[in-house]
Image (cartoon, grey):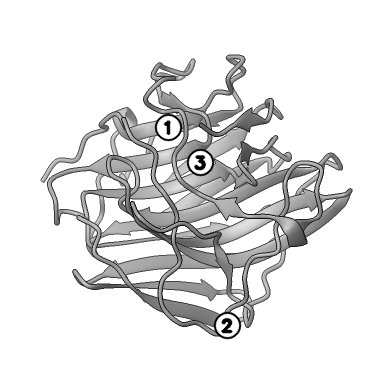
């Protein structure tokens, strides 16, 4: 099926479901210690900030990258590889790189990825998973057994079965991996490959300078997704500042690069 971008009219709630050996994510809001925070990765502002960036991508307050949508059941698995960025700014800011199923055009989302943050002038890097449903809300959860560092090559995958989702990260540099399986009954109507300004304690963060992120070896349902430029997203904050520039897909249709342009202004979540 050919996937296409569709506007989001409802904001997803968050949940982490099931048992895991991972610990709760100790991230933070723009000026607060990470230990007191709740971290979210839902799409924010798409319905009311619908427009186009200078490169023609559809804009959103917190997601950059690519999203493909289709009928229920058309997105079952997703995966990609990227390199954890080296942050070069000192102001507090939070960024996430991830793959997911659902979340773009419905109120479910299963996802996993890495986080690159600056907290009180100190950089912090984490690996995490999260499950969102319409009725339950909770922050992302760390993979406590997986330590990631800038420069590490990461392969992330999400596999859904209709009743469960398995979220897995592999650090190709160290050879270590972590995974979590949770109950999941999302419709499977979208797949995403996203670089995000993280929602922390109800505010979309300012973006630390992560330079650029290249997503490669992208798969959807085990096959080349044949990405189209019309499926791309860029972050534009509430003041109209374009924070990212997402490239056209590579010639194979299974990769792209998104580039940091600006810090942006922290944006309250509705």
Camera-nearest label, 1 or 3: 1
Identify which residue is drawn at 25% across, 58% down. 186
State the image quarter where residue 245 is shown.
top right
Kindly report the distance in space between the C-alpha atoms of the residues bearing marks 2 and 3: 24 Å
* Viewer-closest of 108 and 155: 108
* Viewer-closest of 252 and 197: 197
Kindly report the distance in space between the C-alpha atoms of the residues bearing marks 2 and 1: 31 Å
Whether residue 227 appears in this view of the structure is yes
Q: Tag 1 or tag 2, which sits nearer the N-term?
A: 2
Q: Is residue 182 left or right of residue 156?
A: left
Name the secondary structure under disc 1.
Answer: strand
Q: Is residue 118 left or right of residue 98?
A: right
- Crowdedness of circle 3 by 10 Å Cα count: few (<14), some, many (20+)? some
State the image quarter where residue 100 is shown.
bottom left
Q: Which residue is mark 2?
A: 175
Camera-nearest label, 2 or 1: 1
Q: Which residue is mark 1?
A: 233
Identify which residue is drawn at 60% across, 45% down. 198
Name the secondary structure under disc 2.
Answer: loop
């Amino acid at each position: 099926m050919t996937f296409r971008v569709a506007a989001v009219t409802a904001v997803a709630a968050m949940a982490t479901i099931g048992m895991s050996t991972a610990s709760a994510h100790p991230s933070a809001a723009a000026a607060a210690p990470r230990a007191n925070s709740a971290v979210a990765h839902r799409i924010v502002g798409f319905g009311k900030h619908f427009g186009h960036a200078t490169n023609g991508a559809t804009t959103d307050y917190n997601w950059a990258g690519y999203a493909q949508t289709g009928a229920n059941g058309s997105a079952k698995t997703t995966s990609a590889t990227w390199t954890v960025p080296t942050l070069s700014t000192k102001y507090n800011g939070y960024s996430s790189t991830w793959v997911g199923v659902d979340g773009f055009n419905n109120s479910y989302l299963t996802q996993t990825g890495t986080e690159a943050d600056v907290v009180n002038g100190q950089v912090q890097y984490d690996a995490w998973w999260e499950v969102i449903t319409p009725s339950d809300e909770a922050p992302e959860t760390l993979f406590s057994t997986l330590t990631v560092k800038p420069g590490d090559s990461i392969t992330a995958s999400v596999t859904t079965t209709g009743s469960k989702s398995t979220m897995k990260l592999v650090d190709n540099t160290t050879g270590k991996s972590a995974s979590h399986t949770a109950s999941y009954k999302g419709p499977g109507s979208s797949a995403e490959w996203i670089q995000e300004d993280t929602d922390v304690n109800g505010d979309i963060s300012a973006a630390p300078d992560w330079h650029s992120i290249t997503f490669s070896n992208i798969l959807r349902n085990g096959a080349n997704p044949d990405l189209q430029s019309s499926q791309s997203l860029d972050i534009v904050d509430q003041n109209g500042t374009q924070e990212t520039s997402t490239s056209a897909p590579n010639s194979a249709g299974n990769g792209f690069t998104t580039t940091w342009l600006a810090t942006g202004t922290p944006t309250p979540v509705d």
